[in-house]
Amino acid sequence: GAVVSQHPSRVICKSGTSVKIECRSLDFQATTMFWYRQFPKQSLMLMATSNEGSKATYEQGVEKDKFLINHASLTLSTLTVTSAHPEDSSFYICSAPRASGGAGTQYFGPGTRLLVL
Amino acid sequence: GESVGLHLPTLSVQEGDNSIINCAYSNSASDYFIWYKQESGKGPQFIIDIRSNMDKRQGQRVTVLLNKTVKHLSLQIAATQPGDSAVYFCAENLTGANSKLTFGKGITLSVRP
């Protein structure tokens, strides 16, 4: 069964509104979670690393004020797309390593499809 | 509009044949590699991994080959089935780099019945 969940699975919003996406590890604790963005027919691009108890680390070119990340607990990270615009429409995927430093045990969520009108 | 080169290449194979999916990775210091399968509208699913101290690893119907000299990774799928149709990504990791994965471009595998 799924070990990482995301909510919502899809969302449609108007331009200028903010959208929150949740990522939960279901049966393990994750001090670190990762957020990816995937445009159609393209690969996954890492946006940021979410760290429980500290600030997120953003990849180069990702606006931290636009993509707010909060690692609220050891099982929950949220990504808020603020003032969303049509170009933010994408497939957002989170992942969580199950053991510290274990990249191979990184589980991916099912993704959230965001469509900004 | 769309830009040339951003579309995923497609590999079309006959059901029952073997498939070979190739990937060139970027960081010569990477020491851990993973193949993922992604079906439409879903998150990536782990297939098989290999560490840099190995050049071959086998799983059930899948084999991963690593050539560090030319920074090349391949995934072999034996007796390809319709359910194997998906996009396949290789990912590389540098141990200690906080588990960050760097994904390759991806290849679409299409299985003909």
Image (cartoon, rainbow, N blue to C red):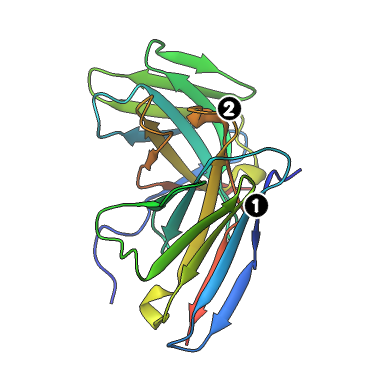
Residue B110 is at least partly visible in this image: no
Q: Numbered disc 2: what chain?
A: B
Residue type, mark 1 in image: Arg
The residue shown at (31%, 27%) is B72
**Tag 1 residue:** A24
Q: Splitting the image into 4 quarters, where does residue A98 fall?
A: top right
* Disc number for residue B59: none
Within-10-Å neighbours for mark 1: few <14, some 14–19, many 20+: many
Q: Numbered disc 1: what chain?
A: A
Is B8 in front, or is A50?
Answer: A50
- Name the spot of residue A106 as percent of width and height, x first: 55, 36
- Name the spot of residue A11 as percent of width and height, x first: 59, 76
The residue shown at (64%, 23%) is B60
- Name the spot of residue A49 as percent of width and height, x first: 42, 48
Helix, strand, or loop for circle 2? loop
Residue B88 is at least partly visible in this image: yes
Q: Are marks 2 and 1 on the same chain?
A: no
Number of the front mark, 2 or 1: 1
Total numbered badges shown on the rendered structure: 2
Residue type, mark 2 in image: Ala
Q: Which residue lies most toward the right here? A: A1
Q: Which residue lies most toward the front here? A: A53
Q: Quadrant of the N terminus of chain A?
A: top right
Helix, strand, or loop for circle 1? strand
Rendered position, A72 above or below A20: above
- Is A15 positioned to the left or the right of A72 in the image? left
Labels 2 and 1 touching (C-beta < 8 A):
no
The residue shown at (31%, 26%) is B30
**Tag 2 residue:** B78
Instruction: Give how far apart the Cα atoms at labels 2 and 1 are.
Output: 35 Å
Q: Which residue lies most toward the top here? A: B53
